[in-house]
Image: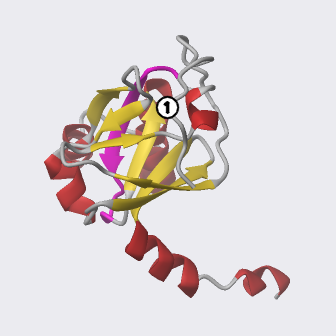
Amino acid sequence: MAATADTEGTSELPQHGVDLNGEFHFKVDGKGRMALPAKFRKVLSKDLVVTPELTNECVYVFETPDFNEWVEKLFIDRFGEYKESDREHVKLRRVLKSRARDVEVDASGRIMLSPEVRAAVGIDKEVVVVGNTGRFEIWDADRFKTMSDEVDLGLFYS
């Protein structure tokens, strides 16, 4: 289901901690632009951060404060904290930040995915946008179907 290019109600202020839900199907045009779901545009600011997921499964899209919080949480979860004096921490953070791209939602409610980001996660034309806590994800449609087909929700009953 494609979203219309309705930008009315797009918030100018970041809504830190926005929780996004749902699955939406879109196409990426030849220039790398793709529409965002209207319901996401209504609660997100125009300035976002896109970055490949750690293992290049999909693209994560964050509000800027949420991206920085995600980076911080990665260090806390793995190492307990970020240490500026630890060379490995500095290298890891450098790579995380270098993979991120600042993007702006245009007047038509689209964002631009750079050729590098699309290549990293294998996005061609058809994508699935999936809401996830504190961010949303952009998946190549075939990759998303394969991943979701492998998920056993019955595990919640064990």
Q: Residue furthest left?
A: 116
Q: Is residue 65 above or below residue 70?
A: above
Q: Is residue 82 above or below residue 140?
A: above
| Residues shaded magenta | 45-56
> In the shown orientation, is residue 60 left or right of residue 118?
right
Quick one: quadrant of the N terminus? bottom right
Residue at x 37% of width, y 62% of height:
126
Q: Is residue 157 above or below residue 103?
A: below
Q: Can residue 53 be found in the magenta stretch?
A: yes
Residue 65 placement (x, y as % from top left): 48, 25
Residue at x 52% of width, y 46% of height:
136
> In the shown orientation, is residue 88 left or right of residue 12?
left
Q: Can residue 120 be found in the magenta stretch?
A: no
Residue at x 55% of width, y 27% of height:
6
Residue tagged 1 = 5
Q: Amino acid at mark 1?
A: Ala
Q: Is residue 80 visible?
A: no
Quick one: quadrant of the C terminus? bottom right
Residue 101 placement (x, y as % from top left): 26, 35
Mark 1 neighbour class, 10 Å CA radius: few under 14, some 14 to 19, many 20 or more: some
